[in-house]
Image (cartoon, grey):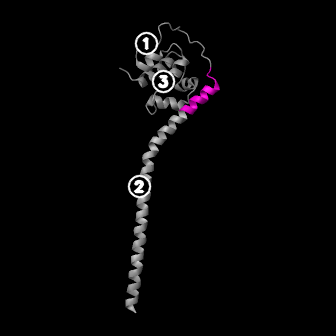
């Protein structure tokens, strides 16, 4: 069975093959998404959300949400007209909400990445502090030995 990501790809290819859109960028813009976010979903760098699939179906209502989401049924609904019906542009607030949600997802991913990096950085800082103390101890020891050697020469 195809994965949801593969079904998203197939639906987008179908939209382009049927001359409803000329590029993934045009589909993304109609969905209210940044084209790079759509690319990340297609390549597997971001998860496919239910909202994303609903937005994709919103650009061409005959697309079947059920087929994309679960693989059940057909890609194009049986009662679908053969011509593209005009789909109203999403209000600007909707686009803003999508952008905010995408930014939240990016921050979540960065946080997941940064956590282990912060732990590693803390361990390295601790090691540097320990080494600095050891260097200072060795300098003191060297200074004492130099003074002892100087006093023996006199």
Mark 2–mark 3 Cα distance, whole angstroms, equals 40 Å
* Residue 16 image point, x, y percent: 51, 19
Element marked by disc 2: helix
Element marked by disc 1: loop
Q: Quadrant of the N terminus?
A: top left
Task: Decide: is 19 above or below 124.
Answer: above
Which residues are drawn in magenta? Answer: 89-101
What residue would you read off at disc 3?
50
Residue at 39 percent across and 77 percent down: it is 141
What residue would you read off at disc 2?
123
Element marked by disc 3: helix
Proximity of marks 1 and 2: CB atoms separated by less than 8 Å: no
What residue would you read off at disc 1?
74
Residue at 43 percent across and 16 percent down: it is 67
Magenta span has 97?
Answer: yes
Q: Earlier in the sequence, mark 2 or mark 3?
A: 3
Q: Which mark is residue 7?
A: none
Main SS category, magenta section: helix
Mark 1–mark 2 Cα distance, whole angstroms, equals 54 Å
Q: Earlier in the sequence, mark 1 or mark 3?
A: 3
Residue at 45 percent across and 16 percent down: it is 66
Mark 1–mark 3 Cα distance, whole angstroms, equals 18 Å
């Amino acid at each position: 069975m195809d994965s949801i990501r593969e079904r998203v790809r197939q639906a987008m290819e179908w939209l382009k093959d049927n001359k409803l859109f000329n590029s993934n960028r045009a589909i993304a813009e109609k969905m209210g998404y940044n084209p790079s976010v759509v690319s990340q979903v297609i390549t597997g760098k971001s998860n496919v959300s239910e909202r994303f699939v609903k937005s994709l179906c919103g650009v061409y209502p005959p697309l079947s949400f059920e087929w994309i989401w679960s693989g059940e049924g057909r890609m194009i609904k049986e009662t679908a007209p053969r011509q593209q019906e005009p789909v109203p542009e999403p209000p600007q607030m909707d686009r803003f909400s999508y952008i905010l949600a995408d930014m939240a997802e990016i921050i979540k991913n960065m946080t997941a990445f940064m956590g282990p990096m912060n732990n590693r950085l803390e361990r390295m800082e601790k090691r540097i502090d320990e080494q600095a103390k050891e260097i200072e101890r060795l300098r003191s020891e060297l200074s004492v030995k130099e003074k002892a050697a100087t006093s023996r020469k006199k």
